[in-house]
Every structure is written in C-alpha cells, then in structure tokens.
Image (tube, rainbow, N blue to C red):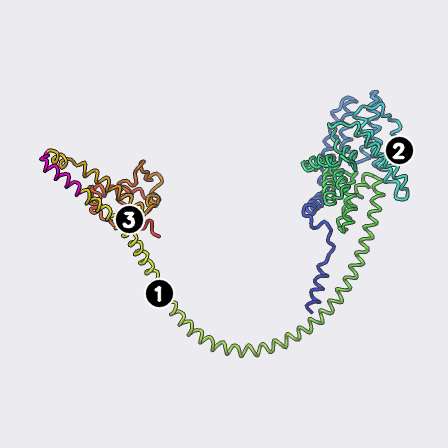
C-alpha cells in the first residue's frame, strides 16, 4: 500500500518542466517578458500618443522641406510599427524630394521603400525598387543603409525559399554575407548600429570574442527600450549560440524580445526565434503564447515572410498540443482507475476503523476508571511535590546566603592578607625610621648640638613628608587590591563630573575618602583621623561626590562598598 501511494504521488507531481527551470536568471527574465506582453497595450498607447503629438505638428508646417523632415520623423515611428502608414510617408517624401530636385533624398527613400516592401514579404518589388539605386552615387551614410537593405532583402529571400531549395537558399545567404562585409567596410564606429554590423561581420570568425565583449558591455548597461537594444541583444545571442553557450543565447534572445515588446515593434524576429527554442525545451505553453503574439503582429504589419515561418512553428506546436492532450487523456484514465481502487481501499479502511472505534470505546471506559484512581494518587503526589518544592526553595535560599557569606569571607581574607603584608612592611619601615631618628638625636645630644635638635623637632616637614609617603603607600596598596576602583567609581558619577587625576597621582582626597568607605570605614570622624584632616573636610567631600552621582544619594555609599566584588 505504501509503495502504491508513493507511486501515485510521483505520477501526480511529474509535470512538464522546461530544461531551463534551474536557471533563476532566465526564469526571471521570462516572467518579465510575460509581464510586458500582458501589458502590450500600454506600449501601443504610448506609441500612438507619440505619433499623435507628431501629427499635431502638421498644422505648423509651412514649407515642403519642413513637411519632408516631419514625414521622416513620422516614418521613424511607423516603419516597424505600421507598414501601410510608413509607406504613405515614404511616397510623400519621394514626391517632395523629386519636387525639390534632391536626388540623394530620392535614393534614400527608395532604399526605405525597399525595406518596407521586404518587410511585408514583397521581395521582388523590393528588389526592383533597388535597381534604381546605384551605390556609386550614394554618400557614406546612405551606402551603409543601402548595404543594410540588401543584406535584409537577401536574408528574407533565404527564409522564403524554404527547405526544398537548399542550394538556392545558401546562395541567398552567401549574398547576404557579402553585403555584411560591405557594410563593415563602410560603416564608422559613430554609427548607432555599428556593433550590430560588426557582430554579423565577425560571426564565426577569429575576432568574435572581442566583439562579444563589446556587445555584452553595451547590452548589459542598456535599458532594453530601443530598437537598437533589441538588435544588439539579438546578434549577441546569435554569437553565444555559435559558441554553444545555450543559456547565454536564451538569456540575450529574451532581452531582445523585451526591447522589441517595449518599443511596440511589429516586425519582431526575437520572439519568433524564442518560441522555437522554448518549444524545443518543452515549454509548449509559453512558446504558443509567443508565437501567437508574433502572428498577431505579423498580420497587423502584413509581413508575409514571417507569417509563412510562423505557420510552420504553429503547426509543430499544434501537434505537440495534440500529443500532450492524448497523454493527458491516457493519464486521466489511469487516474480514474487508481481512484476507484483507492475508493475501495478507503471503504475497507472505514469499516476497519469503525470496528476499531468500538474496541477503543470499551477500552476508553476502562481507562477512565483507571484515570479516576490515578488522579487521586496524582493529587497526593502533587501535594507532596509542593511541600518538597518549598523545602527546596528554602534550601536554595540558604545556599545563596552561604555562598554570599563565603564570598565576603574570601574577599575579607584576601584584603586582610594583602593589608597585613603591607602593614607589616610599613610598621617595619617606621620602626627603622624612628630608630634612625633616635640615633640622630642621641648623637646630637652627645655632641651638645641642642640647636640642631630644636630645629629638627620644631619644623613639621618630617611629619608632612611622612604623611605624603603614608598617602602614597595607602594609594598603592589600595589600587593593588582594587585596580579598577577609579574606573568603577567614575561610572557612578555624571559624565561632566568624572575625576581626572593629575600626572603622578594615584588617588586624590575624594578617592581616598571613598577608598576607605570601600574598605568598610564609613564614619567620617574615623576617616578624618585616618587621613589626618578635619571631619568637616571629609563631610564636604562626601556630600560633593553624592551630589554628582547618577544614582540616588542614599544608595551611593552602599554602592561604593560593593565596587570590585567578584
């Protein structure tokens, strides 16, 4: 049963997953392209609004030349958007150029007319139109346009010749390649489509890598919103296809399609090719949507060549849809059989469950009786547990108190040990000094140097020196025991009331007073005796420090006494 379930689950989960699905970037670009196609009407409206603004300018035209340049601007908007409207402006400008006697203009518009005829599938008429154009009479710029149109024309001849005339098709493509070479020999890097021509020239040749780098830089930094962006992305995709880099080919063909959709281009090659690729990769639905979009545009533009090619792709997609429909029907039949089997299994399972529920009901009644008895025992156990918890809390409290007492004893012992050593050293030092003082007095008495003895005993310098040494020893001893005292004490004061010691100072009067407080001497009189100063001085200093504290005044002394505890 378990294996049957997992087998069915696997079949249900297996869907047609495109081969590119693992490439996040390509999937993201395709979703972006789908979104743009869904809002194609937005781009068409923007295009129509721009054309409408240009149409309004006709009222301001005063001369034939002004009409000529306005027609040229309108042609630029129409030539890959609406072939009929574009052809109207071509004819108008041909008449204006003839009327003004501008032969070069006439040649330019014959080339543009040939382009429109080629784009709409009238290839013979397009070829006939170019018979009136001699490349020798053209300027450098028009030569580029002429060679470009010849390349475009023979490309369409090759597409239109079909698969049965491979020799003829190859001949057309060879001529197309010749005109590609002619363009590259004529065009300058300033031309907006220079990289497009360069890509075709070096396709399949030694210098193609540097061209790919140039095109890659151009496409990746573009906004993909002009026809030039679409063309550059298209030729870059073709170069990656030649190199066998299929992911990059697909990526930049999508970029070309994005630019074509955003510019409302109806003579669109990128999506047609993209539809073929996606069809081969198994994404039939997306391929169908893209080829339908291309067909709608081709019909509006009346592009006969593209409609022929699109019909071939549509037929392949239609057959794929039919095949998938047959597979879905077969799968549906299989699922119906599986559903029937599962229904029978489910019915048996329900009957078994009902039987088990009866047994469970009987067991549950017995279990309820046992639960009642168990609850009584649980209540008794809960009461005992509560009493035990209270006893544990009391024990933990006693343990905490014991730990605190032990900590204080350890700290007290540590301080005592430190101070005993220092006190013994100081006492020994003072005994030595007193003995030296006694010997000095004794010598002077024996020598009857009474004046010297009087001078020694009259001046307080000795006592002052000894007091300074006493302060220094106290400061050193205290800071040795509590090295972080100054930092911790400053942390209790306001930022602008921090104590900053002078160079060479270990402690000052305020710090010594609170050092004694830290040692447990909190009485101001005892502190005054210890420091050999007046009690008023001690009181004033303590009051001043409390006023500068960032904590309540009444807690200041107790907080200081706790500084430095582990």
66 lies above or below 43: above
Cα separation, mark 1 vs mark 3, equals 31 Å
Q: Residues within 10 Å of mark 2 (few under 14, many from 20)?
A: few
The relative height of residue 201 versus residue 107 in the rendered view (above or below) is below
Regarding mark 1 in the picture, which secondary structure is present there? helix
- Give yes or no for residue 41 being in the magenta stretch: no
Q: Nearer the viewer, mark 1 or mark 2?
A: 1
**In the visual, does 186 lie left or right of 32?**
right
Residue 29 in which image quadrant: top right
Q: Depth check: 247 or 299 in front?
A: 247
Q: Which residues are magenta?
A: 434-450
Residue holding disc 1:
395
Q: Earlier in the sequence, mark 1 or mark 2?
A: 2
> Which label lies toward us, 2 or 3?
3
Horizontal arrangement in the rendering, residue 385 relative to residue 154 (left or right):
left
| Residue 127 image point, x, y percent | 88, 32
Residue under the image location 78 percent in, 43 percent down: 273
User: Label 3, on which residue?
Assistant: 518
Q: Which percent across, then down, holds residue 25?
A: 68, 45
Residue 125's tag is: 2
């Amino acid at each position: 049963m378990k294996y049957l379930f997992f087998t069915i689950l696997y079949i249900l989960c297996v869907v047609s997953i495109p081969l590119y699905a693992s490439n996040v970037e390509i999937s993201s670009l395709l979703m972006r392209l789908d979104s743009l196609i869904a809002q194609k009407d937005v781009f068409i409206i923007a295009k129509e609004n721009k054309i409408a603004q240009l149409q309004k300018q006709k009222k301001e035209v005063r001369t034939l030349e002004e009409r000529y340049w306005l027609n040229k601007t309108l042609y630029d908007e129409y030539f890959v958007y609406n072939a009929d409207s574009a052809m109207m402006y071509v004819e108008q400008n041909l008449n204006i150029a003839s009327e003004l006697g501008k032969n070069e203009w006439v040649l330019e518009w014959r080339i543009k007319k040939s382009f429109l005829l080629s784009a709409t599938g009238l290839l013979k008429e397009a070829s006939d139109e170019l018979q009136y154009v001699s490349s020798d009479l053209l300027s450098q710029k028009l030569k580029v346009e002429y060679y470009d149109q010849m390349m475009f024309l023979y490309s369409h001849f090759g597409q239109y010749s079909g698969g049965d005339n491979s020799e003829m098709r190859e001949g057309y493509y060879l001529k197309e390649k010749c005109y590609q070479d002619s363009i590259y020999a004529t065009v300058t890097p300033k031309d907006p489509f220079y990289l497009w021509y360069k890509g075709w020239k070096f396709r399949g040749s030694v210098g193609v890598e540097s061209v790919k780098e140039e095109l890659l830089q151009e496409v990746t930094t573009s906004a993909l919103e002009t026809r030039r962006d679409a063309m550059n992305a298209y030729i870059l995709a073709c170069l990656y296809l030649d190199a066998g880099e299929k992911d990059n080919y697909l990526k930049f063909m999508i970029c070309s399609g994005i630019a074509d959709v955003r510019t409302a281009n109806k003579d669109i090659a990128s999506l047609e090719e993209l539809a073929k690729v996606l069809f081969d990769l198994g994404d039939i639905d997306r391929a169908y949507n893209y080829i339908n979009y291309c067909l709608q545009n081709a019909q509006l533009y009346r592009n006969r060549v593209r409609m022929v090619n699109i019909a071939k792709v549509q037929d392949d997609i239609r057959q794929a849809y039919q095949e998938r429909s047959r597979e879905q029907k077969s799968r549906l039949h299989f699922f119906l059989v599986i559903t029937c089997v599962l229904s029978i299994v489910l019915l048996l399972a329900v009957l078994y469950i009902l039987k088990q529920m009866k047994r469970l009901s009987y067991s549950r009644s017995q279990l309820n009786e046992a639960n009642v008895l168990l609850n009584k025992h649980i209540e008794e156990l809960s009461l005992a547990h509560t009493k035990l918890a209270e006893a544990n809390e009391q024990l933990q409290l006693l343990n905490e108190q014991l730990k605190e007492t032990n900590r204080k004893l350890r700290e007290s012992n540590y301080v005592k040990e430190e101070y005993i050593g220092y006190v013994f050293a100081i006492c020994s030092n003072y005994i030595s000094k007193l003995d030296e003082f006694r010997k000095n007095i004794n010598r002077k008495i024996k020598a009857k140097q009474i004046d010297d003895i009087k001078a020694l005993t009259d001046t307080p310098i000795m006592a002052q020196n000894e007091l300074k040494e006493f302060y220094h020893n106290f400061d050193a001893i205290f800071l040795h025991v509590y090295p972080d005292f100054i930092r911790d004490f400053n942390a209790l004061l306001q930022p602008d009331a921090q104590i900053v010691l002078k160079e060479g100072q270990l402690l000052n009067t305020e710090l010594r007073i609170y050092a004694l407080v830290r040692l447990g001497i909190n009485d101001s009189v005892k502190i005054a005796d210890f420091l050999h100063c007046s009690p008023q001085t001690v009181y004033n200093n303590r009051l001043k420090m409390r006023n500068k504290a960032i904590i309540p005044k009444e807690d200041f002394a107790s907080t200081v006494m706790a500084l430095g505890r582990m």
